[in-house]
Amino acid sequence: MSETVIRTEHLSKTFEKGKAQEVRALKSVSLDIQKGEVFGLLGPNGAGKTTLIRILVGLLTPTSGRAWVLDRDVVEDIDYIRPRVALLPQEAGIYERLTARENLIYYGGLYGIPDDALQERTDRLLDIVGLREKEDYQVRGFSGGMKRKVLVARALIIEPQIVFMDEPTTGIDTIGARVVRNMLKKISSEHKQTVILTTHDLHEVEELCNRVGILNDGNLAAVGKPSALEEEFKAANLEEVFTGLVTGEGVYD
């Protein structure tokens, strides 16, 4: 039986932009995400993806509607939620003067992970992302792709129940991207961790995601398995579904 770990009901967010101007970033979004899913959150720039994620991790407060993560209200119970979720933003910061290992140890230590467990997790994650031979090098000398691998490992060091990843393979070479994708598959299938993934790579979505939600101009335009959406909208592939919903061309009700 499936277990809902994220639920939103008529979730909306409005930002003030200058005098008497408002921007509605989210418009009455209702969504359920199940435990162990890799859920793809798709949409053009400005569609509301980042706003939705920021509300779910407690960085923004909704204007109206409600959201629950792990059965807890994101406004009332955020102190319960935060230690159990991880966020990898697209522009994540990294401690340049620390080594790859030190970045993971420091971050895990902030969450009070016991030293033995922290060392074991660090060893395992450095092996998985292929940075074990570089573990004692300061990351300021790393390429953008290598830094991204450190950040992915850092997000997973706390073994979160839910991990939000914004463009996790950005800047990573083909082999590195494959490593990250395989890791996300593994934590979903073997450890039943839930992954919320944003990406513009629709081939990556089709490979990884159990279901997707397509946001456009703050509205949730469609939710479902990629194959089901293709059938529903009489499209040859997910790209046609996405393009049709965003542009209004080529999608049939």
Image (spheres, rainbow, N blue to C red):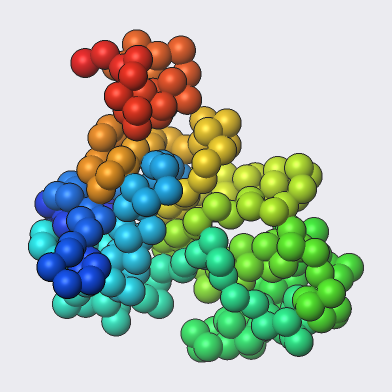
User: Looking at the image, which residue sits at the far front?
Assistant: 19
Point 10% across, 62% down: residue:
64
Residue 76, position in %: x, y? 17, 77
Q: Quadrant of the N terminus?
A: top left
Point 67% across, 83% down: residue:
95
Visible residue check, residue 101: yes
| Front in this rendered view, residue 102 or 98 | 98
Point 27% across, 77% down: residue:
78
Q: Is residue 124 left or right of residue 66?
A: right
* Number of marks: 0
Residue 56, position in %: x, y? 30, 64
Which quadrant of the figure has residue 154?
Answer: bottom right
Q: Is residue 100 left or right of residue 108?
A: right
Which quadrant of the figure has residue 156?
Answer: bottom right
| Front in this rendered view, residue 24 or 223 | 24
Visible residue check, residue 183: no
Q: Compared to 127, does 134 lie above or below?
A: below
Point 47% across, 25% down: residue:
239
Q: Is residue 68 left or right of residue 65?
A: right
Residue 250, position in %: x, y? 35, 15
| Front in this rendered view, residue 146 or 163 | 146
Q: Compared to 217, does 193 lie above or below?
A: below
Q: Compared to 87, does 194 lie above or below?
A: above
